[in-house]
Amino acid sequence: MNELIRYLLENMILDFQGEITLEQVRGMLRNDGSREAKSLLEKLTADAGVDDMLVTLADTLRDHMAHGINNDVVREQLQMYSES
């Protein structure tokens, strides 16, 4: 049973439902003056969209699925993405 669980956790796919555009992200972060928000917007603008962020975020969050994904984990991963 442990081997099956390990296999399932290692091969689980994380995806995001629906579409989100750079303009939608800008709208969500419009009133957020934090350094994190500014850094993320700069990265997304340089990348010309959110596609790379979504793929990277899904890949990095997959490592946290066994222990739990919460606001802090997502924030940390977005910050790491924006600094890459």
Image (tube, grey):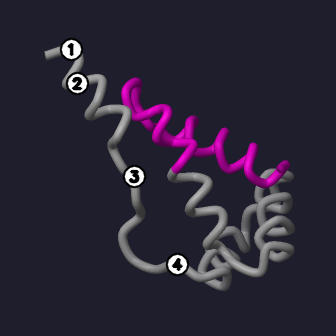
User: For mark 2, what is the residue?
Assistant: 5
Instruction: Give me the C-alpha separation between circle 4 and circle 1.
Output: 37 Å
Which numbered disc flags the more N-terminal residue, 2 or 3? Answer: 2
Q: Mark 1 and mark 3 in contact? Answer it, CB < 8 Å.
A: no
- Identify the disc placed on residue 14: 3
Report the magenta stretch's main SS.
helix
Instruction: Give me the C-alpha separation between circle 1 and circle 2.
Output: 5 Å
For disc 3, the neighbor class at 10 Å (few under 14, some 14 to 19, many from 20) is some
Q: Mark 2 and mark 3 in contact? Answer it, CB < 8 Å.
A: no
Q: Amino acid at mark 4?
A: Ile
Instruction: Give me the C-alpha separation between circle 2 and circle 4.
Output: 32 Å
Within the image, what quadrant is residue 39 found in?
bottom right
In the rendered structure, which segment of residues is drawn in magenta? 59-84
Q: Amino acid at mark 3?
A: Leu
Classify mark 1: helix, strand or loop: helix
User: For mark 4, what is the residue?
Assistant: 20
Q: Amino acid at mark 1?
A: Asn
- Identify the disc placed on residue 2: 1
Name the quarter where the N terminus is drawn: top left
Instruction: Give me the C-alpha separation between circle 1 and circle 3.
Output: 21 Å
Which numbered disc flags the more N-terminal residue, 4 or 3? Answer: 3
Q: Amino acid at mark 2?
A: Ile
Classify mark 4: helix, strand or loop: loop
Query: Hey, which residue is sitting farthest top in the picture?
Result: 2
Percent position of residue 77, x then y: 65, 43
